[in-house]
Image (cartoon, helix red, strand yellow):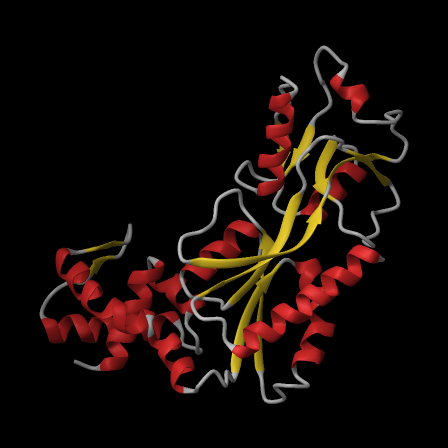
Amino acid sequence: MNIHHLELFYFVARHGGISEAARRMPYGIQQPAISAQIILLEDHLGVTLFQRRPFELTPEGARLFAFIEPFFANLHAVELELQGGAVHQIRIGASSPVLRDHLPALIRNVRKKFPQLRITLRDGHQPDLEEWLASNDIDLAVTLLGPRPLPGVNSVSLIKLPLVLLVEKSSRLKSAEELWSQDKINDPLVALPASDTISINFQTGLARRKIDWFTSVEVSSLELIEAYVANGFGIGVSARAPGRELPTKVRALPLEGFDPVELGALWRGKLLPVYKEFLTEMQRRAKHVACS
């Protein structure tokens, strides 16, 4: 069997379809080329490996994937091990503000020790980053730490961020306690998905106070929360990073007694030298931000 055909099949099976495989391949290849080469593999074997719509592995496809998965899944780790830790590339995932405001300085410092280092950056939020790390699509994630450790994933806390409510600057609210004293909170809540750590900690804090206040507008990022609060869609729940300016039409109310969230770094497997250097720079940066 052609090893390249097997590699393409591995990515299709792992990511649940040809279009998704084309997007996740570590090198450029178009969907028609993947499809054509998978057909060649099926013709060679004389079996159908998966149903196209909806995607589902056939029994033969599941058997082949179970056989090749350990090899391809561990190929990147073996490559790094054979290089003796002299990593030539690192793939980092984080949110847009982290990539934009903090990573450039970190990368410059790390490249002083690893001048030939190639870096791939992926913009994503907590659920995406955890999924990419688990599927070996990134090597290092900078994101909020969940309430439970992820299986097989190492983590280090970088900084604790207090929860805040975001209101329009013209709002008459002076504190969150004014809301808690109401019989019923009628203001719409703008928040991240329920699975996000910020939403979990916020709802846990509400439950301790025996308060029901559920999301009216669900968005995917803190920037969108700020934008929708500024445009009058309700009150937002967010985490306040030191030194980060809010939009001019928005102000923050502290949430006393609510558990903060922790921004941390996640990785799998051995802590290679370049990973360790990034972690050291992240910790130094977090300490500087916390003191600013």
- Extreme residue toward the top, this view: 183
Residue at the image position 75 percent from the left and 60 percent from the top? 287
Residue situated in front as seen by the camera: 22 or 210: 210
Q: Is residue 76 left or right of residue 258?
A: left
Residue situated in front as seen by the camera: 81 or 250: 81
Where, by quadrant of the figure, is residue 63 drawn? bottom left
Q: Is residue 211 left or right of residue 162?
A: left
Q: Is residue 268 left or right of residue 46?
A: right
- Is 244 placed above or below 22 here? above
Residue at the image position 57 percent from the left and 35 percent from the top? 200
Q: Position of residue 103 (x, y in %)?
A: 69, 69
Q: Position of residue 239 (x, y in %)?
A: 71, 44
- Is 268 placed above or below 234 here? below
Say which quadrant the C terminus sits in.
bottom right
Residue situated in front as seen by the camera: 62 or 282: 282
Residue at the image position 26 percent from the left and 57 percent from the top? 52
Q: Position of residue 48 (x, y in %)?
A: 15, 63
